[in-house]
Structures are given as structure tokens and as C-alpha cells.
Amino acid sequence: MVFGKKATGANPRFRAFDLLSTLIAVVNSDGSVLFANAGLEDALGTSRRTLEGSQFGACFHEPQVLRTALDGASSNDFATLRYEAFLRRVNHELMPVQVTLAHGDKKGELIIEMSPLEQQVRQDREERLIDQAQANKELIRNLAHEIKNPLGGIRGAAQLLQMEVESRDLIEYTQVIIHEADRLQTLVDRLLAPHRRPHVVGDVNIHEVCERVRSVILAEFPRDLHIERDFDVSIPEFRGDREQLIQATLNIAHNAAQALAERRAAGDAQITFKTRVARQVIFNKQWYRLALELHVIDNGPGVPDTIKDRIFYPLVSGREGGTGLGLTLAQTFVQQHHGVIECDSVPGRTDFKILIPLP
């Protein structure tokens, strides 16, 4: 990669671009770089001083595409242009990006914004999750209330009937009705639980949450399950509902432990709690300077392909006998902390990542 004359310093007009997680370059109409933000530096593995003053086309796998776009901008053929391209990193690795080219504040200046396609796909997925969660919330509340009233009537009628009948066989039938009505009532209560319980906010240490979940899981699966800790102890406390976060993490870890049945039988089942700080991230359509990343990773068979896109839907379960509520409730609790849960799963490694903003 050949670069031209280096710039002597960054223009203070462009410093706000350093706050963005997308990759930004401000160029002249001839393609020479006036400014490169910190995100672009990190993505390319090249210093800002090296980039500024150089021909930005040299950073692309096909420089001529950018040249054509710049010519079109100079002749006012468009106000904004979008296309896909490949950025060339310092180690010659190619990064697929979506490029948006727009006019700057001054004549002859153009702003090039690049979003890694992986990030774009993730943002689209998060937006779907947000919409899905809102739809699920309304569906659950309406459905639960519709079930609750007739369920009480069925149970009451069965109790009255039981008092009138004398046949032992008939009494067994009424007891079945009462038992199943109680089971459905418990299911309805679980569906409504996150919407009924008040949000109790206090200082939360995420590692205390992990330790609490670890002790509960090991109490239920005391043999043939190893839980590894990989903690970033510098993560600060944050404001949140400790019990909700314990429940959300427990639901994920419990699913993992149950999915590890074959690994536990083989003696090599493992769950890892991993914490990190993410910087300059976007989720839930918001930009955050810092965010907590909590990973719950297991070495099980992975999420079945048939339900991968629906694992956060209520009543969807990959396990026979499962209620399909654990992940739905976990996502609800995390979203109440302005966070999100993501899942990356292949056979042998499933990673549930909880993202929550940090102060």
C-alpha cells in the first residue's frame, strides 16, 4: 500500500467523529484523506498520521470504485451514495463494509462512512429482537389474561364436582383436572412474572452475580460439570436489578447444563463465565462508550438449526419437556437494563453474550 504526504495534524472540526463506532474518513474530491477517525485506525491497523494526506483509494481492494464515486460526487450526480466494498487491512486481510459517501460541510469535502457488514447484520438482528420482544410482551400479557379467567372457572367447577361424586374413579378424574389447571396457572404466572415484579435498582457487581449462578448450577449438577471463570476484575459496579440479572444468567446457564447431558456422561462438560468491557459499541439502536460483555459459553451440541432464529420466542424449546420460557424471560430482564442477549452457536461451542451499558 502506497501512501502520500502525511498531514501535520487532525482538524478539530472532525474530532466528534472519534465518538462513532463506524469507520469515518473525510477526503478531498481528489481522494486525499483530511481526517480518519479512531475506528478506522483500529480497523485498518494503520495510524491516523499515516492515513491523513494519503490517497484513500489505496485502502480498498478495488480503488477504482471509490474513484468513480468521488467523480460522481464532484459532478453532483448524487447527494448520497451507498455501495459495498472491501477494505484492505495492514496485514492484507480484507474487511467487507457498506460504504456511504456524502457531501461534507465545506465544498470539496466528502465524508465516507463505512460499516462492517458483520456489524450491520448484527444491528439488523438486534432490531428484529427488539420488535419481537415488544410483540411477545403484548402477546403474552393478553394471552395470559385470556387464559387466567376461564382456568379459574374450570378449577372451581372441578372442585365442586369432586364434592358431589362418590365414585373413586370419577374423583381421580376431577383431581386430574385440578392438577392440570394448577399446572397451567403456574405457567401463566411465569409468563406474567417479569411484567408484575417491580424493577429494584441497586449497585450490581457482575462477578457476584456469576458466583451466585455458579453455586446454584453446581448444586444441581455436582458431578461431571466444570464451570470455568474468565473474569475482567476491572469491570466497575453498575446500577441494576441484581435478582433479575441473577435469574437471566441462571436461565442461560441452566439451559447450557441441561444441553451438556452427553458431555457430562463423557466427563468433559464445561461452562465458562467470561466478562469483558466492550468499547464504543452500538446495540438497541444506541451508541455506548462502555458496555459489559458477559459470555456464558458451553461445549455442548449447539442450538438446533430448526430453532436458531426463534430461541427467544416464548414456548420455543429445543429440549423435550422444556417450557420454552427461560430465554424469553432472560431477554426480558436484560432488556429492562437497556441491554440485549446475543447467541452464536455451532456444534461444540455455544456462546450467549449479554450486553449491558456501563456508566
Image (tube, rainbow, N blue to C red):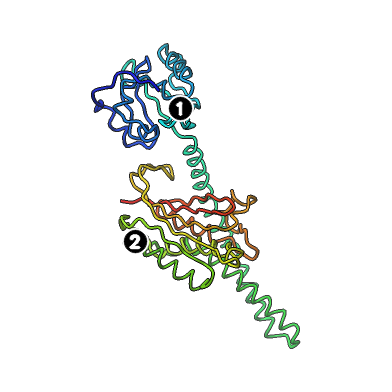
- Left or right of residue 249, residue 322 in this image: right
Task: Classify the position of the N terminus by image quarter.
Answer: top left
Q: How many numbered marks have been drawn onto this rendered protein structure? A: 2
Give me the C-alpha separation between circle 2 and circle 1: 40 Å
Residue at the extreme top: 75
Q: Nearer the viewer, residue 146 or 314?
A: 314
Residue tagged 1? 99
- Left or right of residue 100, residue 277 in this image: left
Residue 346 in the image, given as x and y percentages of width and height = 57, 50
Callout 2 crowding tier (Cα within 10 Å): few <14, some 14–19, many ≥20: some
Q: Amino acid at mark 2?
A: Val
Residue 74 in the image, given as x and y percentages of width and height = 40, 13
Q: Quadrant of residue 231?
A: bottom left
- Left or right of residue 243, residue 329 in this image: right
Residue tagged 2? 204
Q: Nearer the viewer, residue 89 or 346?
A: 89
124 shown above or below 171: above
Callout 1 crowding tier (Cα within 10 Å): few <14, some 14–19, many ≥20: many
